[in-house]
Image (cartoon, rainbow, N blue to C red):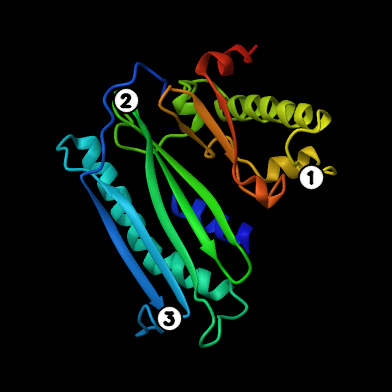
Amino acid sequence: MKRFLSVLLALLMLPVAGALAQSEQPDSSLLGVVYYPRGSTEETASFAFRYRLPQFSAEQPQYEAVNQYFASYAADVVETLIPATIGALDELPASGEPEYYVDLDYRITASTGDHLSVLLNSQQFLGNTLTEQWVSVVFAQDGIYAGQPISLSQAMGLEQESGAGDVASELVYGLVWQIIRYETDAMRGAYFPDLTEEEYRLAFSPQDDFYFDEDGNFVFFIQAGTVAGEVEGVLTYPFSLAELLSGIV
């Protein structure tokens, strides 16, 4: 179930780091809650999906595009994600049992003249334990991609290179795998002892699973419970742009 919802979120979400400017903060948020079964209330619902997504009042074209992106995302939540989530559940709680829910929130992890980095956090209770999943969206703030989500290759300035997607992805796959192997050998963390590189690659997409922090680092993340115990939470691996580019021969 965790993997299923992670894929759904990623499907809905379809920079070179410079000196940090003052962060552009959302001026308002798109708020919504949907209860199930239809017509139920907070007191009677067996399932609730609550979401909060950013909106900006700045009049620059890139922020208009960002606002439209999240407005469309909110519509997709209601029209696509919620029905798919309900359909994937084996059953809903009976009357008197704790409701199942998904709470989708966000935080702005970085805002510079080059990029705006938004991290969506999904807290889910679907009958067993509370789980967490992340989806990130990095928007270009200037240039031909202004206001559009960008991939790792574009954020690294490699989009003009032939096979840039493979180069950037393979670079990060290798660097993060080295960290995992080192920490496993040193008995640090709670990585699955029989984790294979193939399984690790299936759990991680460098082109999409990254955001920028306030220091301009690329922070890659792997969902909780995919390569290590659920108690470890979402795993993060920060790298500076210089560290990433130094790995390209």
Q: Are marks 1 and 3 in contact (CB under 8 Å)?
A: no
**How far apart are labels 1 and 2 at the CA level?**
37 Å
Q: Position of residue 206 (x, y in %)?
A: 58, 35
Residue under pointer 2: 112
Residue under pointer 1: 192
Task: In the displayed orientation, state which residue is furthest to the left.
Answer: 59
Location of residue 157 by image quarter: top left
- At x 51% / y 74%, what residue is drawn? 86
- At x 63% / y 27%, what residue is drawn? 172
Question: Quick check: 242 left or right of 169?
Answer: left
Mark 3 element type: loop
Residue under pointer 3: 45
- Amino acid on which the number 1 mark rests in the picture: Phe
- Amino acid on which the number 2 mark rests in the picture: Thr
Dot 3 crowding, Cα within 10 Å, few <14, some 14–19, many 20+: many
Query: Which of the image's four quarters has the C terminus?
Result: top right
Q: Position of residue 4 (x, y in %)?
A: 60, 61
- At x 81% / y 28%, what residue is drawn? 186
Callout in the foreground (3, 2):
3
The foreground one among 123 and 73 is 123
Q: Position of residue 81 (x, y in %)?
A: 46, 65
Mark 1 element type: loop
Mark 2 element type: loop
The foreground one among 131 and 87 is 131
- At x 33% / y 24%, what residue is drawn? 114
N-terminal of the pair, mark 1 or mark 2, is: 2
Location of residue 51 by image quarter: bottom left
